[in-house]
Structures are given as structure tokens and as C-alpha cells.
Amino acid sequence: GLVNTREMFKRAVNGGWAVPAFNFNNLEQLQAIIKASATLKSPVILQVSKGARQYADPVLLRYLGAGAVAYAKELGCNYPEVALHLDHGDSFELCKSCVDNGFSSVMIDGSALPYEENIALTKKVVDYAHQYDVTVEGELGVLAGVEDEVSAEESHYTRPEEVIDFSKRSGVDSLAISIGTSHGAYKFKPEQCTRDPKTGRLIPPPLAFDILAEIEKKLPGFPIVLHGSSSVPQKYVDIINEYGGNLPDAVGIPEEQLRKAAKSAVCKINIDSDSRLAFTAGVRETLAKHPEYFDPRKYCGVARDYMFEMYEHKITEVLGSDNKL
Ligand code: G3H
Ligand code: 13P
Ligand code: NA
Ligand code: ZN
């Protein structure tokens, strides 16, 4: 069946690699994630946001989790390690509902709350989840927001002086931190970047690896999580823009920085936007080239192939989680 994240994190931290946490909300994403991780013998975290859970349906998801493990075995992976994880849980009730409905791991994101309230809420979720051997991810520090201009101003890096107290008193199994990543396909504003004079493309500022190093020093061997870690591959942005889309100045985290993070105590790397981009590139390109298509399998099939290729690349070339089962 599904597993929690404890053992995979221990091996990832000790081995200097990171477990992929791929968000999904539809069948094609799930198939591509399982096919890539099972054939490459990589542990994997299937990650579901609150909105994705509603989209896919909570009851259906419970069986999809079990189905994912069976599918991995069918693909020849005899010992799959698949976790079904709630991403950015925003209340005790939501986390409890996921624990009660077959999730093996949950995140309670109290990072926007005052410090003591974050600890209290996180501890409440930990106390419940641990009764069922479900692991819990907490978060300290606020990622820059993409949706509204205001939240970006309120973002702040994780304070290394808080991490020992927070992890001890909350009892979390892993800790998400803020060191300069953010969610979505526009991780940095053009004014935060420099521009490649030849291509005109944005070159983002580096992540705060000094803060990560301080956190590691405070919590040696403790599993650290990096959200907002899509690279926003230019090839998918280009395809989307070529076939009717409009994503100007989309920019992500350069892969060499994620590679460096994966070698550290960062043992879970969250990727959602890159899957959305690969999917959309496949759909737009196929429909533009074949206006006569109306069978969703035609264009969703191409989208699935693009996502599969992207997941394979992350596992083997960025996170180093292949051949770990
Ligand atoms: O962290 C956010 C994830 O990318 C999920 O986003 O709430 O639009 O499903 P969502
Ligand atoms: P991206 O938007 O960079 O894919 O981040 C996903 C994420 O952190 C999900 O929790
Ligand atoms: Na690591
Ligand atoms: Zn996130």
C-alpha cells in the first residue's frame, strides 16, 4: 500500500538526493508520475492540494492512491514507495479528513500565522496524524506570492533561530522553508532579474543557500522541504507561446540550484507548475497542428508524453532519486 515519508526521507537525507513531490489532479498526470517513478525505481510523493482534492473528488482519490501502487507494480516495480500527501493543508479539519481518507502524509501550512499559533495548529495535526502513522510537514517562513502584489511584500525567509524550537514543540516530521522560491510560473519579477542580452530571457537571482546552511547546522539530518521548485522549462513556454498561448517572462528556479539543494538536507522538492506547462504545451501544440482532432485521448495523450519526459528528467537529472528502490 501507500507509505508515509519517514523512511524515504531518511535515505534521501543520508544519500544526498531528494524525493520528488509531484502535484496532480487528473488521470494523465497520475499515470505519467507513476510510470516515470516506477520505471526509474524512484520513491515518489503524490501531492494533492485542497483545490485538487475537490477537483479530483476526495472519495475517488482514496482509491486512486491504492490504484497508483498497483499500477507501479504492474509496471515491474516490485517495491514501490508511493506516498499520498496533502499539500498546503490550511486547517486541522482538512488534515483530519485526509488522514481519515487514506492519505499517508499531510502538510499543515501555518506559515502565515503568528509563530505560536503556527506551532499550536501544527502540533494539533501532528498529535492526530501520528496516531495513524501519517507523517506531517510543517512550514516556517513565507514564500513570495505570485497572485497578489501585497503578499510578496510580506514574504520573508525562514529564521534559522526558530527552527529548533518549532520542530521540537510541533513534533513535525519535515519542515518546509522559505529561501527564495515561490509558487507558479512567475517566480521573480523582471526587476529582480538580469536579462540575457542575446536571448532576452530573464536570469533569476540565486536562492539563499546561506540560510539553508544555517538551518542545516541547527537541525542536522532533519528533513527539509523546498516548495515552489519548478524550473519553468523554456521549451514548454516556447511551445505554448508559439501555439496561441501568452506567458511573457515566465521564469523558474534554475536546475543547477535544485541539484545543489537536493544534495543538501533538502529531501523533498515540490513541482507542480512544470507539469501544468508540459501538459498545456502538449495540448496547444497538438490542437494547433490538428484542428480536426476532437478525441481528448489524442491531445491528452501527447500532454501525458510531455509530462512523462519532464518527470523522467527531474528524477534522473535534477533530484537523483532514481535506482533507490
Ligand atoms: O502550492 C500550490 C500548488 O501548486 C497547488 O496549487 O492550489 O492551484 O492546486 P492549486
Ligand atoms: P511550483 O509552482 O514551483 O511547481 O511549486 C509547487 C509547490 O510548491 C506545491 O506545493
Ligand atoms: Na537531499
Ligand atoms: Zn507549495
Image (cartoon, rainbow, N blue to C red):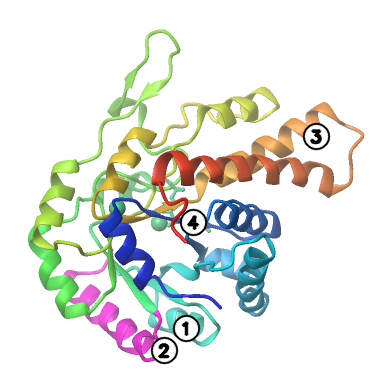
Above or below residue 200? Residue 275 is below
> Tag 1: Cα neighbours inside 10 Å, few (<14), some, or many (≥20)?
many
Which is in the foreground here, disc 2 or disc 4?
Answer: 4
Which is in the foreground here, disc 3 or disc 1?
Answer: 1
- Residues drawn in magenta: 112-134
- 22 left or right, relative to 242: left
Regarding mark 3 in the picture, which secondary structure is present there?
Answer: helix
Residue name at image x 61 percent, y 70 percent: 69
CA gap, disc 2 and disc 4: 25 Å
> Tag 2: Cα neighbours inside 10 Å, few (<14), some, or many (≥20)?
few
Q: Position of residue 36 (x, y in %)?
A: 59, 51
Report whether the residue tagged 3 is closer than 8 Å to ligand 1.
no
The reply to whether callout 4 and callout 3 are in contact (CB within 8 Å) is no
Residue picked out by circle 1: 99
Above or below residue 149? Residue 15 is below
Above or below residue 135? Residue 55 is above
Regarding mark 4 in the picture, which secondary structure is present there?
Answer: loop
Amino acid carrying mark 3 in the image = Leu
Please tell me the numbered disc located at residue 42.
4
Is residue 225 visible to the viewer in this orientation of the structure? no
- 129 left or right, relative to 60: left
Place residue 37 in its image quadrant: bottom right
- 104 left or right, relative to 163: right
The reply to whether callout 2 and callout 1 are in contact (CB within 8 Å) is yes
Above or below residue 263? Residue 85 is below
Please tell me the numbered disc located at residue 287.
3
Amino acid carrying mark 4 in the image = Ser
